[in-house]
Amino acid sequence: MEGFYYSLIIVSFVALILFDYLYFLIPDKIILPLILVSVLFNYFFRSSEFVSSLLSALVLGGIFAIMYLSSKGKWVGLGDAKLLFLIGLVLGYPLGFLTLMLSVWVAALVGIGLMILGKANRKTALPFGSFLAGVSILIIIFQNELQKIINGFI
């Protein structure tokens, strides 16, 4: 069941990458059903991690929801907050937070690279949801190895 769940998430995240890249939009028709599936999956199949995943989702989504509200949508979109909520449900703590940190770094490096090449300036918008979904896919694929590394530090 876990393999099917992660396959569904990965395929959906590939769709989100493309959609956000092309339209700067993260559709609710993809995100909301995935949130429901993730809540049910965590409740029924990972009940010991349910509360931790839910708290991670609330913190990650909440941070970006506050950024969205305080900037009136100029810094980040509400879709990014919903996507981070989903990432918190899927990856929990600490991998959800690692996903956010790596996504910020990857997006920053891509933005700097585009500016160096003259294809962007400081005002050029980047589809941050694409970076979140892309890094999430990598973290899902390598989560066992990453968890071993993280446990070595704790």
Image: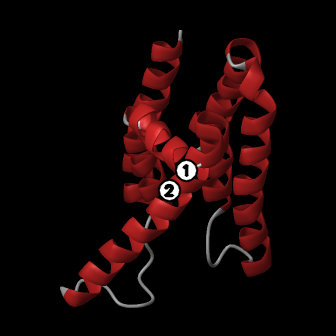
Where residue 7 sits in the image (x, y, percent)? 43, 22
Q: Which element is circle 1 on?
A: loop
Q: Which residue is mark 1?
A: 26
Q: Amino acid at mark 2?
A: Gly
Q: Is disc 2 surrounded by few (<14), some (14 to 19) or many (20+) residues within 10 Å?
A: many
Where residue 49 sits in the image (x, y, percent)? 73, 28
Q: How many marks?
A: 2
On screen, residue 98 above or below 53: below
On screen, residue 57 above or below 112: above
Where residue 144 sits in the image (x, y, percent)? 44, 31
Residue lying at 66% horizontally and 23% vertically, measured from the top left: 37
On screen, residue 53 above or below 79: above
On screen, residue 139 above or below 6: below
- Confirm whether residue 109 shows in the render: yes
Q: Which residue is mark 2?
A: 129
Question: 70 or 3, which lies in front?
Answer: 3
- Confirm whether residue 83 shows in the render: no
Residue lying at 70% horizontally and 64% vertically, measured from the top left: 64
Q: Which element is circle 2 on?
A: helix
Where residue 88 sits in the image (x, y, percent)? 65, 44
Q: Is disc 1 surrounded by few (<14), some (14 to 19) or many (20+) residues within 10 Å?
A: many
